[in-house]
Image (cartoon, grey):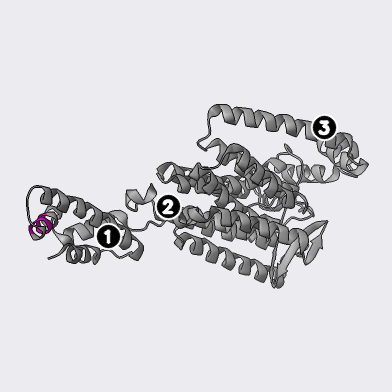
Amino acid sequence: MTISDFLNAVTSFIRSTEVKTHVRQELKLHMKHAKNAWLEKGYTESEAEQKAIAEMGSASQLGKKLNKIHKPKWDWLIISLMALIFLFSFLPLLASPDGQYTSSILIEKKIFHIIIGIVLIFGFMWIDYRKLLRFDLYFFAGGMAISLLFLLFPNRIVNGQAFFAIGPIVVQVWTAIPFLLIAWAGFFTRRQWKLWQLLALFFISCYPILANPALEAALIYSVVVAVLFLCSHYTKKQKIVLFSSFLLMGGSLLAILISQAEPYQLSRLYGFISPEKDASGAGYLYLLLEQAISEAGWFGANEVLLIPESHTDFAFVQIVHVYGLVVGLLVASVLLIVAIRSIWIARLIQNPFGKMLIIGGVTLYSSQFIYAILIVLGLVPIIAIPIPFISYGGTSIIINAIVIGMILSVYRRKSYPKSQFS
């Protein structure tokens, strides 16, 4: 039996083609070293090869053992939680007091969005995420191209924001963020970039998002990049200096914006700070949301209020108001468990690129629903940030499905031969 014959026998017991390739490479390298060691002891080529094969033991037993150790993993917990979340996503539509969101068209579109989400989740789960590292610049260019597409060639404008409609799918500039996330995970993994270069790339990528204008998307994107930077290889001093500079710049910019703001913009700010003073104007929505939550009780309000955008921006408020705090806490808990589970997976991963992907992904995912919950509590100004998978719309489904798919892709390959994680 030759080494090639032995490798064929071993890998015949391994089901996954992807794992089979990696195991074959690992064993071939190991047996080559073993053969060379026997050659140095004076054995002939044929004898050294047989000695190296004998050291490996039974091909069938080794193959079965390696198949068990390195077979792809399915995270059934996240998959099960996603099934629950998809079911919960119908609640805001079914809770509309006047039935405007329960039409067959919207329900059918929601089902179509969910199908797209499921396809994206399993599609990205099957992609070997490790192969994406070499294409980080291409993903950055792709994210830039998508954001510029919305800026320059939108085919629909709603409330001043650009949308792009392709059949039943209507998406926003948010769809650029997952591609930029993959790029930044690669940038912080490679360690070949200087800090000033990354800062330049960040400001360049922010421009088309802010010019859209999509301030809420720019906010979430900035948080994702900031968290990845905090988890990167840069020194503690560099992180402190950079964040201090950004806080100073941000505070100065905010002061300038407030000093030059238009009256209607200032009224929105005052509406958040003191909604009671402008109850019929900018403070109306804050008071309405406060009333909706206060009347909800444990099992829902007796008289359902008409909440604007209750199937999109305020979907969580609608769920709590109509179905009660019990259901609201259940939905929030499931969303939170997905984030916690993702963080736990990141702790298991040795591959730095895989770890960065999960950290960036869970930041993108969790920052959305955390902000939505803070809006419910009246702790932050109201801006249009969707709740992952719960809010109606193709954009939310697409970006978060890509995130969940990438997390499952990393988990699926967590037990692959260790050298592949270097």
Instruction: From the image, state whether disc 2 or disc 1 is nearer to you.
Output: 1
Distance CA(mark 1)–CA(mark 3): 61 Å
Q: Residues within 10 Å of mark 1 (few under 14, many from 20)?
A: some
Total number of numbered discs in the rendering: 3
The label on residue 411 is 2
Q: Residues within 10 Å of mark 2 (few under 14, many from 20)?
A: many
Residue 120 visible somewhere in the drawing: yes
Q: The N terminus appears in which quarter of the rendering? A: bottom left
Q: Residues within 10 Å of mark 3 (few under 14, many from 20)?
A: few
Distance CA(mark 3)–CA(mark 2): 44 Å
Residue 282 in which image quadrant: top right
Query: 244 and 33: which one is in front?
Result: 33
Residue 275 visible somewhere in the drawing: no
Q: Position of residue 232 (x, y in %)?
A: 52, 38
Report if residue 71 lies within the magenta region: no
Picture layout, residue 265 above or below residue 10: above
Q: Residue at x 49, y 53 (%)?
A: 133
Disc 3, SS: helix
Disc 2, SS: helix
Numbered range of the magenta stretch: 47-51
Residue picked out by circle 1 = 24
Cβ atoms at labels 3 and 2 below 8 Å apart: no
Query: 392 and 245: which one is in front?
Result: 245
